[in-house]
Structures are given as C-alpha cells and as structure tokens.
Image (spheres, rainbow, N blue to C red):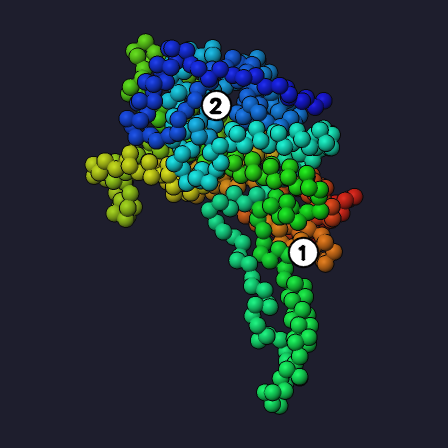
C-alpha cells in the first residue's frame, strides 16, 4: 500500500538553546582556526519523529507530495524503533547551510555532529563538483512543490504521481559531468548564410545573362531544396546525447505540464548528483575534521570514552559493504602523511629498498596543504584512482571477494592491488550504474528511440533494463531500443509497448 507523506509541514525551531548556541560558537571557532571556509550554518533542533520526517524528504521540509517519502519515513522510523539505526546528523548544501540536530543527543554527540557539519559545509562550498549547484535549493524545493501541487489540483493526484514515478526511474539518465563539460556542438550556420556558393547554378555565357539564366526565384528554390536535404542528412540528435532526461524534455511528445515535471526532477537530480560523486571524499573530509577538532580542541577528559565509542561505531567496516567514512578519512590521513614525509614523486616511486621506503621522511610538511588541494579538485573516482596505493590496501586489509556457487557462500578472491582498485572504481563510476546515451531519435526512420550503453565490462541487469525501457516508452510513446553487449555479444534490446525482444546488432 502506498503511503502518502504529510501534506502540512511543521515549522521547526531555528533558535538553539543557550548551551547549544555556545557550543556552536566554540566549534565554529575551532573549524575556522583550522582554515575551514563555509557559508553560515543554521542548526535546527528536532525530536526523533521530526528528524525522520525531514530525513524522508531528503532534508527539505517543503517538497512535493509523493508516496516514496512516506515509504522512506516508515522505513526510518521502524529502523530507529528496532535499534537498527540512528540519524546523528543531516546537513543541506545551501547558502546558508541547514543542519539538523537530534534533541535527545548528549553534549558529546552534539559537539561531534557540529564539527562534522562544518567539515561538510566547507566541502560543499569549495569542492569543484559542487560549484554549479543551486545554493538556494531550500527555496527552489518549495517552488517545485508549489508548481507540482498546481498540477495536482488541475490534473489529479494519481495522474501526476504516476508520471513522477515514471520520471524517477529515469533520474539516473543524466550527464553527471554536464556542468563542467560542453558536449553539444555549436549550432551550425544556416546554409542560406553561406551565400549561393553551394547552389548548383546554370552556366551563363555572358555576365549580363546571369540574372536571366539563374533568376532569383530559381536560386531561392535551389536553396530551399538544399536546406531540406541537409535536414534529412542531419542525425537526430546530431551527436550522442548523454543527458537522456534533457533529450526527453526537449523532444518527447508529452504535455506541457509533464515537460515541466520532468524538468523539475532533472534539476533535482543534478543538484543531488555531486553528493553521489563525492560520497567517500565528502564523508571522509567531514570525519577527518570532526576527529581533529574533537581530539585536539573540543573534548574534555570526561568525554573521551563516549566520543571514542561513537566515533568507532561510525568508522566500523562491514563485510557486506564499503564504509565511505572509514575509507575517506584513512585515505586523507595517508595523503597527509605521505606529503608530510615526501613519499611521492619519481625518486620515491623508483626506490626499490622496502625498508628505506618505509622509513622515508624528507620532513616536507606539505600534508595539510595537499589535503586542502585534494578537497578542492577531486571526486571519488579520481581520488581513488590517484591516491590509492598497494601499501594502503595492504595496511587496511583490502581484498576482492566473489560468490562461490558450489560452496554457496562469498569467499576471498584476490588481494591483488589492481583488482582491488578496479573493483572500487567500478562501484564508484556513475554510482555503479550503466552509462547510457541517446544515439538516434528517429531510429529506422520510424520515430523510435535508440540508446547505447557505454559498455565498460559490466552487462546490463535485464529485469532493471526492461523496467526502465517500459518507462522510457511511456514518455517517448514510441518503441525504445537499447544497443548493448550481453555475454560478449552485441545486442539490441527492444520494447514496442507490448513485449520485449532482443536481436543481434
């Protein structure tokens, strides 16, 4: 059963009590002393029900109504009630930044959360991949809600919700690097601007006969014919389009309100995209600074044990999944240590004496400067690609595991550095999702849609691919085709609105 979220939103208090206000001032001062640079931060203190409601909405109290928010709320509430999880902090990339504190947290937790929040806020403001995000997204989300509610009143809740469901299944089909890479070519000049040089003219024996042999009407007709031929030859789209949602918003035969809803969800997808692209770095950076601030400045002697208990719980690695907090903080510490000791560059890399490399220390002291540079310029993929080392993997006992069918269990498959690194990069690139692009909007000259998977060695999961194709059909309203590779064989998957099929490409 679909659960709809509350339609009336509470106005949460923004004023901290005297003790928390003093703590905020103290932790903010420490953060600034260490060189962190952030927008103003507004802390809001919520009880556990209010916090879970805001968390279900992704941190934005005023969002459009949709059943998934209610589902998320139920999941968070039950997980908290059963003691399976607890939300310690939540911070929003905005100017000013908004952060939420749990009312029932003790003073040690409030200090830790504040220090962690200031690390996030510094990252939001200074990391390259957040530079193009909307810094007034709190207001923009409220505007989105207003627009969608207008459509709900006009077209009905079920129709709008159903279309939102369709769009949400496509919100990963965007170009995550679009804000920094211009992929679309400049618009081609119209043929008419080139003069009559491309028009095939009849030959005039004398210059004065030119206007009679090639009259203006004839030249205009020839120019029109050339333009029509050029349009036929021009591919649609002219170049492969990786932003599938943009292509659909521009060209799909949908109603005006649907185009607006699709554009709203695309805008939100681009807002959240950098958070997915920098999850390891962002959490690692915030954890590094809460650890630094708490252990060097903010803790009293009586608070050390409580802090160590809560910090170690956050940093614990699970056999089932990677912990971005742990990987991020440890890799940043490793970078700081290497640049402090000069463990980089040609001389260090070419040294074959393992004892000498282990004890290498040029006392450069450039570690802090380096991690600030890394925070500014990198995302998770190039962070891991650039700074993950065999020594780091060995020290932290990284390995690759795989499923043994005969033993019916997961087993250690390899400790080779290249395989570990490749596995990490596969999980982080495009969130581990397939990279798709629109190749042809008039496939087979029948108005069909053709997409191509940028195959990186991982095949599509067929059931997910088919569900996505069905939703693409709802928007495109013509058959949808996907060019891919399955088990090493080039294939084209097709959905015609009734059934799925596949053929060799």
Other-residue count near label 2 (Cα within 10 Å), few / some / many at <14 / 14–19 / ≥20: many
Position of residue 324 in the picture relative to residue 240 (left or right):
left
- Against 348, residue 112 (above or below) is above
**Which residue of the protein is positioned furthest toward the right in this rendering?**
498
Residue at image point 68% right, 66% down: 228
- Mark 1 element type: loop
For the C terminus, give its image quadrant.
bottom right
Along the viewing direction, whichever of 342 and 64 lies nearer the viewer:
64
**Which residue of the protein is positioned furthest toward the bottom in this rendering?**
205
Pointer 2 residue: 90
Pointer 1 residue: 505
Residue 281 picture quarter: top left
Residue at image point 56% right, 70% down: 194
Locate residue 393, reporting x and y percent.
Answer: 39, 35
Position of residue 167 in the picture relative to residue 137 (left or right):
right
Residue at image point 74% right, 48% down: 478
Residue 30: numbered disc = none
The mark lying in front, picked from 2 and 1, is 2
- Against 228, residue 364 (above or below) is above
Along the viewing direction, whichever of 313 and 132 lies nearer the viewer:
132
């Amino acid at each position: 059963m679909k659960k709809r979220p509350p339609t009336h939103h509470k106005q949460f208090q923004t004023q901290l009590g005297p003790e928390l206000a003093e703590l905020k001032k103290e932790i903010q001062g420490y953060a600034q002393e260490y060189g962190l640079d952030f927008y103003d931060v507004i802390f809001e203190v919520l009880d556990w029900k209010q916090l879970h409601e805001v968390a279900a909405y992704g941190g934005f109290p005023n969002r459009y109504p949709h059943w998934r928010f209610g589902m998320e709320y139920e999941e968070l509430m039950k997980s908290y009630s059963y003691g399976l999880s607890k939300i310690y902090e939540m911070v929003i990339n905005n100017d000013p930044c908004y952060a939420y504190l749990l009312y029932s947290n003790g003073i040690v937790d409030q200090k830790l959360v504040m220090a962690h929040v200031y690390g996030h806020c510094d990252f939001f403001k200074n990391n390259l991949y957040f530079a193009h995000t909307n810094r007034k997204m709190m207001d923009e989300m409220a505007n989105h809600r207003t627009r969608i509610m207008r459509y709900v009143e006009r077209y009905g809740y079920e129709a709008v919700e159903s279309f939102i469901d369709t769009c949400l299944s496509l919100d990963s089909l965007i170009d995550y690097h679009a804000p920094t890479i211009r992929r679309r070519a400049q618009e081609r000049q119209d043929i008419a601007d080139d003069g009559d040089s491309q028009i095939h003219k009849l030959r005039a024996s004398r210059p004065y006969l030119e206007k009679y042999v090639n009259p203006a009407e004839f030249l205009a007709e020839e120019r029109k014919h050339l333009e029509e031929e050029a349009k036929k030859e021009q591919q649609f789209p002219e170049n492969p389009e990786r932003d599938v949602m943009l292509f659909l918003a521009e060209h799909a035969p949908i109603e005006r309100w649907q185009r607006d809803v699709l554009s709203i969800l695309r805008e939100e997808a681009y807002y959240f995209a950098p958070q997915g692209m920098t999850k390891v770095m962002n959490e690692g950076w915030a954890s590094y600074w809460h650890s630094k601030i708490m252990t060097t400045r903010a803790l009293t002697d009586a608070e050390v044990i409580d802090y160590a208990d809560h910090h170690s719980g956050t940093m614990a690695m699970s056999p089932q999944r990677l912990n971005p907090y742990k990987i991020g903080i440890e890799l940043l510490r490793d970078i700081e240590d290497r640049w402090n000791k000069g463990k980089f560059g040609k001389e260090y890399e070419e040294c074959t004496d393992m004892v000498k490399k282990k004890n290498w220390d040029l006392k450069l002291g450039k570690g802090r400067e380096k991690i600030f540079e890394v925070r500014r310029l990198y995302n998770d993929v190039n962070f891991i690609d650039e700074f993950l080392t065999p020594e780091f993997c060995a020290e932290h006992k990284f390995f690759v595991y795989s499923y043994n069918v005969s033993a019916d269990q997961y087993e250690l498959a390899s400790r080779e550095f290249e395989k570990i690194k490749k596995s990490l990069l596969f999980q982080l690139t495009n969130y581990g999702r397939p990279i798709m692009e629109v190749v042809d909007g008039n496939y087979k000259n029948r108005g069909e849609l053709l997409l191509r998977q940028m195959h990186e060695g991982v095949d599509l999961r067929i059931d997910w691919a088919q569900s996505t194709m069905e939703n693409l059909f709802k928007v495109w309203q013509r058959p949808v085709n996907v060019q891919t590779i399955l088990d090493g064989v080039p294939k084209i998957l097709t959905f015609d609105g009734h059934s799925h099929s596949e053929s060799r490409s």
